[in-house]
Amino acid sequence: MKRLFPLTAALASSALLLTGCGGSDASGAAGSGESGAAAEEATVGISQFVEHPSLDAAREGFVAALEEGGYTEGENLTLDLQNASGDQGTSTTIASNLASSDADLVLAIATPSALGVAQAVTDRPVLFTAVTDPVEAGLVDSLESPGGNITGTTDMNPVAEQIALIKQLDPEAESVGIIYSSGETNSQIQVEMAKEAAAEEGLEVVEKTVTNTSEVAQAAESFDTDAIYVPTDNKVVSGLEAVISAAESKQIPLIAGEGDSVERGALITQGINYEQLGRQTGEMAVRILAEGADPASMPVESQEETELVINLRAAERMGVEVPQELRDSADQVIE
């Protein structure tokens, strides 16, 4: 595993190295059976922006941590799960519904959902997960002191390390195509970081933006570059198969922002574990529900470590030879 180093000024603070990072035993008796024994009934509303493996894994990790903390669905826990299917209007409606519900706590999964919930739900605790930069998005005052009724976990990835993989795969690479949704703040932040990293690597960046998943295929097919990079963008990842197909037909590597995309057919990433990120968020929920913790003073959490994941089957389909050094240093190799 490799450490996730600071990548932006907003995320360079020590708040990224918080209790709860990196393992299920992190921060907290709140996640133990001792807390669970005294757990009362609770209703938790969940607003998920779109269904895809990383966000699903975060949700599953969140629910697992609640159960470990003594909150079991069907016994003393009621879950109200609503999915916007990638539509911002639907996400806003879901946030309004949750604001008028009897939920004791609301979880928002991904930046668009978090923005809607933060605006609508102001009278009870709110947690977010899979949000790239909660300060830039205006969700919290700071990572150390959120200051309101909302806190959670950030999925800021080591974008510079991900871009560096292009040259490690092909030292002669000169360009990279980046495809992302123009309407997602989290993606815009990652793309700016990717452009800085690409400049350091001597790579020209070609950008293609989309407004919905149906535009992904055309954007991906239009690239004439030596590699393609996809950040943790909700709309693009929902249409990832089209990007995979383009990379295979062009015989160039596809670098992804997270491991689930590599399992689906991208070639490589250095990324975080979303199931574990969800667990961290769930442990925060238990501290709020069982111990009365105040979100205003609960620092935003992140993961300290990342995983190098390589899909050798994808490499073969893309005509890419993965150096042995990369294979040897991988945390997971899909063969």
Image: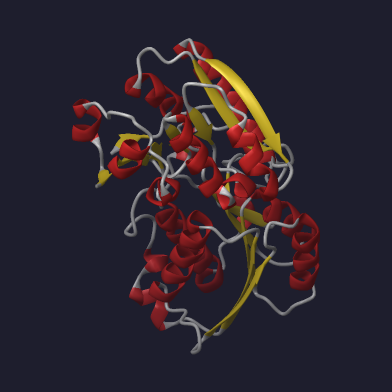
Residue 297: % across, % down: 59, 51
Residue at image coords 69%, 43%: 215
Q: Nearer the viewer, residue 255 or 315?
A: 315
Residue at image coords 49%, 89%: 75
Q: Nearer the viewer, residue 210 or 123?
A: 210
- Is 139 positioned to the left or the right of 167 in the image? right
Question: In this rendering, is residue 163 above or below 171?
Answer: below
Res. 172 image quadrant: top left
Residue 270: % across, % down: 38, 36
Does residue 120 appear in this view?
yes
Q: Quadrant of the N terminus?
A: top left
Q: Residue furthest front?
A: 249
Q: Nearer the viewer, residue 226 or 283?
A: 226
Residue 19: % across, % down: 41, 49
Residue at image coords 51%, 27%: 7
Query: Coloured how?
Result: secondary structure
- Is 142 positioned to the left or the right of 260 in the image? right
Res. 106 image quadrant: bottom right
